[in-house]
């Protein structure tokens, strides 16, 4: 069995009667991720719960995310400013001319390569996901953090 990371959420009164889908969407889960989680990675109070069903105050939602290996070549020689970091999140200020994912074999100068370096060398994180968020305007650190946390 693959190693998994378990995340738990307790439903508060403010989220009472939201559908499970809407609650998790507010937490930042994509529809694609929710579809994957329906295959055994999502329980409410230890049992099956449809995404369209409401959640209730006190419910415990458990998310089981499989830890997957990646094949990105770590590259610590790149210089990408880190705007914010904690044990679960790294926010980079990606240069405009830098690719997010390597473009073919032999390329190791994308943000993904620096990300691989950060998680393997600097943070020793066991599981990671690289999510790229496009922005057309500068974001202040406080704006980014209030949207993500």
Image: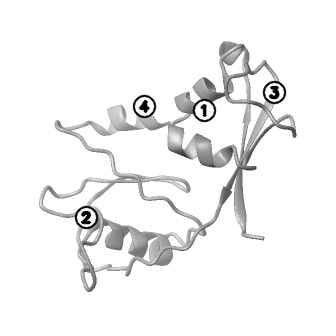
| Position of residue 5 measured from the top left corner of the image (x, y, whole percent) | 69, 58
| 118, 131: nearer the viewer | 131
Check the image and name the residue furthest to the bottom.
Answer: 106
Residue plotted at (66% across, 46% down) = 37
Q: Quadrant of residue 142?
A: top left
Q: Residues within 10 Å of mark 1 (few under 14, many from 20)?
A: some
Mark pair 4, 3: CA separation:
25 Å
Q: Which mark is residue 120?
A: none
- Residue position for label 2: 80
Report if the CB atoms under discs 2 and 1 are less than 8 Å apart. no
**Mark 1 or mark 4, earlier in chain:** 1
| Position of residue 130 measured from the top left corner of the image (x, y, whole percent) | 42, 58
Mark pair 1, 4: CA separation:
17 Å
Quadrant holding the N terminus: bottom right
Can you say whether 50 is above or below 127 in the image?
above
- Residue position for label 3: 59
- Residue position for label 4: 146
| 3, 137: nearer the viewer | 3
SS state under label 4: helix
**Mark 4 or mark 3, earlier in chain:** 3
Give the left or right position of residue 149, taking residue 139 as reference.
right
SS state under label 2: loop
**Mark 3 or mark 1, earlier in chain:** 1
Can you say whether 84 is above or below 61 in the image?
below
Q: Nearer the viewer, mark 2 or mark 1?
A: 1
């Amino acid at each position: 069995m693959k190693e998994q990371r378990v995340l738990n959420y307790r439903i508060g009164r403010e989220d009472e009667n939201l559908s499970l889908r809407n609650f998790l969407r507010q937490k930042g889960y994509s529809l694609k991720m929710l579809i994957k989680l329906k295959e055994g990675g999502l329980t409410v109070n230890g049992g099956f719960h449809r995404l369209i069903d409401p959640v209730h105050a006190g419910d415990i939602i458990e998310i089981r995310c499989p830890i997957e290996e990646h094949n990105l070549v770590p590259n610590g020689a790149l210089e990408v400013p880190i705007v914010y970091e904690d044990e679960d999140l790294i926010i980079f200020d990606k240069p405009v001319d830098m690719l997010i994912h390597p473009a073919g074999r032999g390329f190791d100068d994308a943000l993904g390569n620096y990300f691989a370096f950060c998680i393997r060398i600097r943070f020793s994180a066991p599981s990671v996901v690289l999510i790229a968020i496009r922005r057309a305007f500068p974001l202040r650190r406080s704006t980014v953090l209030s949207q993500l946390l």
